[in-house]
Image (cartoon, helix red, strand yellow):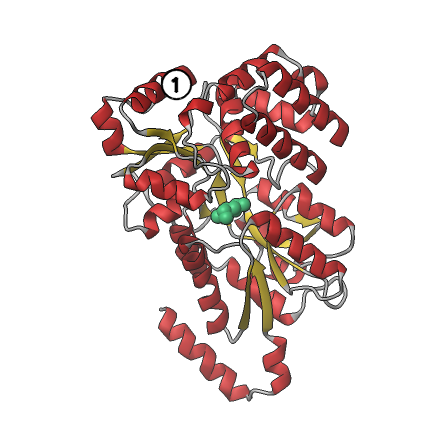
Amino acid sequence: MMKFSKIAASVAFLSVGVSAGALHAQTAEVLHWWTSGSEQAALGEIRKAFEAKGGTWVDTPIAGGGNARAAAVNRMLGGDPAAVFQFSIGQQLRELADQGLLANVGDVATAENWDEKLPPLIVKAAKYDGNYIAAPINIHGENWMFYNTAVLEEAGIEVPKTWDDFIAAAEKLKAAGVTPIGLGGQPWQERIMFNSVLLGVAGREFYAELYSTLDDDLLKSDTMRKVFETFAALKPFVDEASPGRNWNEATNMVAKGEAAFQFMGDWAKGEIIAAGIEPGTTVGCAFAPAIDTAYIMTVDAFAFSAMDGEHATPAQTLMAQVMLEPDVQIAFNKKKGSIPARLDVPADSFDVCAQTAIKTLQDKKTHLVSTGLFGVPSAVSGAIDDTISNFWNSADMSPEEGQAQFQQAISYAK
Ligand code: BGC
């Protein structure tokens, strides 16, 4: 199928004749942070489809989401933007649109009827002033718990459903000489684990209300105290080499049985797949322990720098169109570990963890948004990551102090 369309596209291209201008018009620099094995493989699916349609892809990978996003913004501000850059939909992308830095792909979105094909929450978050400012590619969930099945079995441990159970299991594993939690010690990874604890201890309604209102009473509540106490109780279960570790190295620890668990978004599953492991077998997936069911979503997307006014250029338009093609959504997401952003593409060939995600999302009450890029302004997101990381890495800080710093930083930033 892909072969046929590739040939068809190049024949059509040749028959109209290729001018240097036309070629240039279909060239796009793509700036992104997808540098791990599975991320590269997934991105390769978009690139292949873009090139099959006559596009020329200029690749600019920058390791680390924060670094890549800073580079994309600096390039825009400096007048040398990358045409296409990876981002996530939500409040922080909106901030870039507020500054007039983005082009919209409203024409292709209307022509291809994105409003009907994407879930309402994504439609809303991907638009600014009624127009799409990004092409959404997937839905990732951040409150996953991956585990090494054999390690759990050997230690006689069931997959924990509550944080108390988790702590009891982790003590057992530690006594048996296994690192209970493979953690990449970087602020955003520590925050992902914290938010899983928050959701697990306080529940989905509390999570939604806390991050949508940033209310001082909730931040100062006894419930939050319990969240900080539980998070602090996990400190002894991480190895000494955690600080600075990349997320995919932590996934690798779980795959090899060097660590029992990882709390991470399901891009970790992409790495598991890339290692040749079928998710749900030697590496299993479950939601992090919680009192109810929810899915903390982050939606990867590509946004478009304003190159020449508010409307996307031909290369940007072609890129947007390709990203939402059903074949691309399927091929990309199977490698990435996520599920398609489009509701209407068949997902029956996806793994068991993806099936759980799809089923869970059918209930709207499970829909929560990440504090990374989606659900809170950038200043608040930074305050969350900084204070959580500071608390996690300060051996002497009490849960009370951690909670107070968290509350003060958010209250100042909001
Ligand atoms: C993105 C994922 C990516 C992960 C690690 C997250 O911000 O949403 O797609 O795999 O960062 O690079």
Tell me the quadrant of the picture where the N terminus can be found.
bottom left
Dot 1: element: helix
Residue nearest the observer in this picture, 142 or 410: 410
Asked if residue 404 is positioned above or below residue 257 in the image, the reply reads above
Q: Is residue 366 above or below residue 301?
A: above
Q: State the residue at coordinates (67%, 18%).
A: 404
Instruction: Give residue 122's quadrant in the image.
Output: top right
Q: Is residue 56 visible?
A: yes
Lateral position of residue 143 relative to residue 283, left or right: right
Judge the density around disc 1: few (<14), some (14-19), many (≥20) Cα neighbours within 10 Å: some
Residue 288 x, y percent position in the rendering:
42, 27
Relative depth, front residue between 104 and 211? 211
Image coordinates for residue 351, horizontal then vertical, percent: 32, 44
Taking depth in this image into account, of 392 and 396 the one nearest to the observer is 396
Quadrant including the C terminus:
top right
**Residue shown at the point (45%, 55%) measured from the top left:** 329
Residue 341 visible (yes or no): no
The answer to whether residue 76 is left or right of residue 345 is: right
User: Of all residues shown, which one is farthest toward the top?
Assistant: 222
Q: Position of residue 396 (x, y in %)?
A: 57, 19
Horizontal side of residue 37 vs 67, given as left or right: left
In percent of the image, x 48 and y 56: which residue is there?
Answer: 35
- In the image, residue 127 sits, relative to residue 184, either above or below, namely below
Residue 270 at what x, y percent from top left?
Answer: 39, 48
The answer to whether 91 is drawn above or below residue 210 in the figure is below
Tag 1 residue: 167
Q: Residue at x 44, y 68 (%)?
A: 48
The amino acid type found where label 1 is placed reads Ile
